[in-house]
Amino acid sequence: MLLIVVASAIVIPNYLRHMEAARLDTSARRLLSCFLYARSQAIIRNAPYRLNVEQDGQRYWVTCYDADQADQGQDPFRADTSTLGLPEELPEGVTFEQVLIGDESRQDAGSTAAQTNDDGSLFIEFRPDGTCDGAHILVKGSRDERLALRADALTGRAEIAQEAKQ
């Protein structure tokens, strides 16, 4: 019986740490998938796409340019209804710690503010030529571990990198 208690005391905390790290990793990879989806759709459909990030609400989603809506004087971007484009919330214990888009992502001294939607959410725009607004999105886990999604504005390529604990 004592052996079971001692083993549990060792195994359970390690298991919980592993589950929290897996939750953070999965969240970052899902965000990267949406990023790659929006970029590829912009190229394939020859129309701008956006990855929208609501930092306060801890969610993100994809919108696409709709010329008909633009011609009617409405918001030219509509919700993308594909599985990858639907709104997704970060799981409990995972948050957007920092969202830098456009010039902010390069952290230059003279950087400009990121683009925002009417609802205050930020967006990364993907263009048909494969470029995008640069981005640096820091996702934080419950134990202060961090993963960063970094996007290059010129190539539109993105990657996930581990960030040092602060």
Image: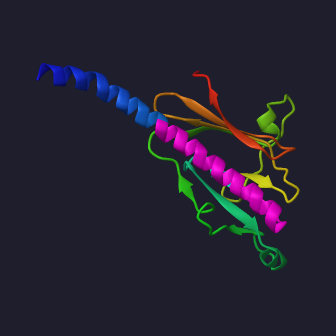
Is residue 101 left or right of 160 when viewed as pictured? Answer: right
Against 129, is 83 above or below?
Answer: below
Residue at point 72% right, 57% down? 38
Q: Position of residue 73 (x, y in %)?
A: 81, 76
Is residue 121 left or right of 41 when viewed as pictured? Answer: left
Q: Position of residue 47 (x, y in %)?
A: 83, 66
Is residue 21 left or right of 101 when viewed as pictured? Answer: left
- Image quarter where the C terminus lies is top right
Residue 68, image quadrant = bottom right
Residue at point 24% right, 26% down? 8
**Which residue is the extreme one toward the left?**
1
Q: Is residue 102 magenta?
A: no
Say if residue 125 shows up in the picture.
Answer: yes
Q: Position of residue 3 (x, y in %)?
A: 17, 20
- Image quarter where the N terminus lies is top left
Q: Is residue 35 magenta?
A: yes
Against 15, is 27 above or below?
Answer: below
- Residue segment shown in magenta: 22-51
Residue 111, image quadrant = top right
- Choose between 47 and 97: the one closer to the eye: 47
Residue at point 51% right, 27% down? 144
